[in-house]
Amino acid sequence: MNYTFFAIGWYIIMRGLQVLFEEYLDKKWYKILIKVVTIVMLYAALASIIVWYREIHLLGFSPTK
């Protein structure tokens, strides 16, 4: 369950950054920031799915049943 909350938290951070920095859409630093946060979010989501089905430790959390 910790992985799921971790992935959801990163999604919330990504969406929050998009809303906060909406006026900087054409800036290079904004595009890099959003891509980095998106990659971390996707990794967390993938880790969440793998742990949910295979119980593999990827982010340091022990999977709960």
Image (tube, rainbow, N blue to C red):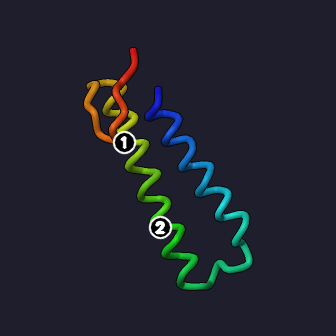
* Residue 17 image position (x, y, % from top left): 65, 63
Which disc, if any, is residue 34?
A: none
Instruction: Name the one closer to the observer, 61 or 45.
Output: 61
Q: Which residue is mark 2?
A: 35
Residue drawn at 59 percent across, 57 percent down: 14
The correct choice, above or below, for 3 with respect to 32 in the image is above
Which disc, if any, is residue 46?
A: 1
The correct choice, above or below, for 20 with respect to 16 in the image is below
Q: How many other residues sit within 10 Å of disc 2, few (<14), some (14-19) or many (≥20)? A: few
- Please tell me in which quadrant of the rendered image residue 39 appears: bottom left
Query: Mark 2 and 1 residues: CB-CB less than 8 Å, in contact?
Result: no
* Residue 47 image position (x, y, % from top left): 35, 39
Task: Judge from the rendering whether residue 34 lies leftward or rightward of residue 53; answer left or right.
Answer: right
Q: Amino acid at mark 1?
A: Leu
Instruction: Name the one closer to the observer, 62 or 1.
Output: 62
Separation (CA) of disc 2 from disc 1 = 16 Å
- Please tell me in which quadrant of the rendered image residue 54 appears: top left
In this view, the residue farthest toward the top is 65
Q: How many other residues sit within 10 Å of disc 1, few (<14), some (14-19) or many (≥20)? A: some
Residue drawn at 48 percent across, 75 percent down: 32
Location of the C terminus by quadrant is top left
Q: Amino acid at mark 2?
A: Lys
Q: Secondary structure at mark 1?
A: helix
Task: Judge from the rendering whether residue 15 lies leftward or rightward of residue 47; answer left or right.
Answer: right
Instruction: Mark 2 or mark 1: name the one nearer the start of the chain.
Output: 2
- Please tell me in which quadrant of the rendered image residue 16 appears: bottom right
Residue drawn at 29 percent across, 39 percent down: 58
Q: Secondary structure at mark 2?
A: helix
Task: Judge from the rendering whether residue 38 lies leftward or rightward of residue 19; answer left or right.
Answer: left
Count of number-bearing discs: 2
